[in-house]
Image (cartoon, rainbow, N blue to C red):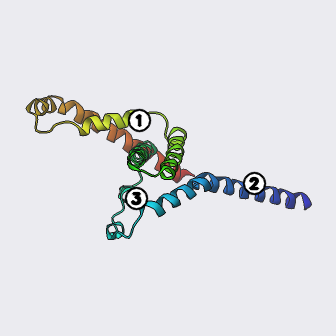
Amino acid sequence: MIAQHMMALFWGVCLMTLGWMTYAEASVPENLEKSIDELKAYYIRNDPGLYNAHPVFLQVLNKLKGKPEESERNLLMSIIMDTYSRIFTRMQNDSLDDATKDRLAHVQQHLKKLQENYFPGKSAELKTYAETLWAIKEDDPIVQSKALIEFKRVYREATQLKNKDRRRRQTKSIRRQKS
């Protein structure tokens, strides 16, 4: 009986510790939070445009339809983190206040660490490909001709990806039903 209570206590402590570790990893470090709060106090003024219910980044994250695959979420988050980096770099370059520049540099360090630790791999490469595609000039006759020449092959590849995705979802659904 005592052994069962000890085991229950042990597992309770383990689960509680795991919960604290998960929360600590998912939360913003205290020194980063302080820097962000100080930057907000410095930059944010009473501008009605800030409160128009149109967020910049959260709107993109909230508008995702369905549940995207992890690779899609990582790519999107990588692009968002890169955009934040460009914004903070611009703010740092435009600032005349040394303390503000230091705070922005501190935020950038955390951002870079986050990007390196949580979004490594092909996200940067995929982002580069996406930027290349976005830069294509739709009104260029040569591009239009090449698009027509390549379309059947691209269409077939897209169809194959869709079929693989459907099969993967069906397999996951079957596994869930069995368990």
Q: Nearer the viewer, mark 1 or mark 2?
A: 1
Quadrant (top left, top right, bottom left, bottom right) of the N terminus: bottom right
What type is the residue that disc 1 sits on?
Ala
Q: Name the one closer to the observer, 13 or 124.
A: 124
What type is the residue that disc 2 sits on?
Cys
Residue 159 located left or right of residue 55:
left
Q: CA distance from mark 1 to mark 3?
A: 21 Å
Residue 58, which numbered label?
A: 3
Residue 70 located left or right of residue 140:
right
Query: Looking at the picture, how far across and down is residue 139, in whole percent?
Result: 10, 38
| Labels 3 and 2 touching (C-beta < 8 A) | no
Residue 9 located left or right of residue 16:
right
Is 141 placed above or below 94 here?
above
Q: Name the one closer to the observer, 112 or 177.
A: 112
Q: Earlier in the sequence, mark 3 or mark 2?
A: 2
Q: Secondary structure at mark 2?
A: helix
Query: Looking at the picture, how far across and down is residue 160, in whole percent?
Result: 31, 36
The image quadrant of residue 66 is bottom left
Q: Earlier in the sequence, mark 1 or mark 2?
A: 2
Q: Secondary structure at mark 1?
A: helix
Q: Is residue 55 visible?
A: yes
Q: Secondary structure at mark 3?
A: helix
Q: CA distance from mark 3 to mark 2?
A: 34 Å
Residue visible at 58% across and 56% down? 27
Query: Looking at the picture, how far across and down is residue 28, in whole percent?
Result: 57, 55
What type is the residue that disc 3 sits on?
Leu
Q: Residues within 10 Å of mark 2 (few under 14, many from 20)?
A: few
Residue 76 located left or right of residue 144:
right
Residue visible at 68% across and 57% down? 20
Please give the residue where the numbered disc 2 appears in the rendered image: 14
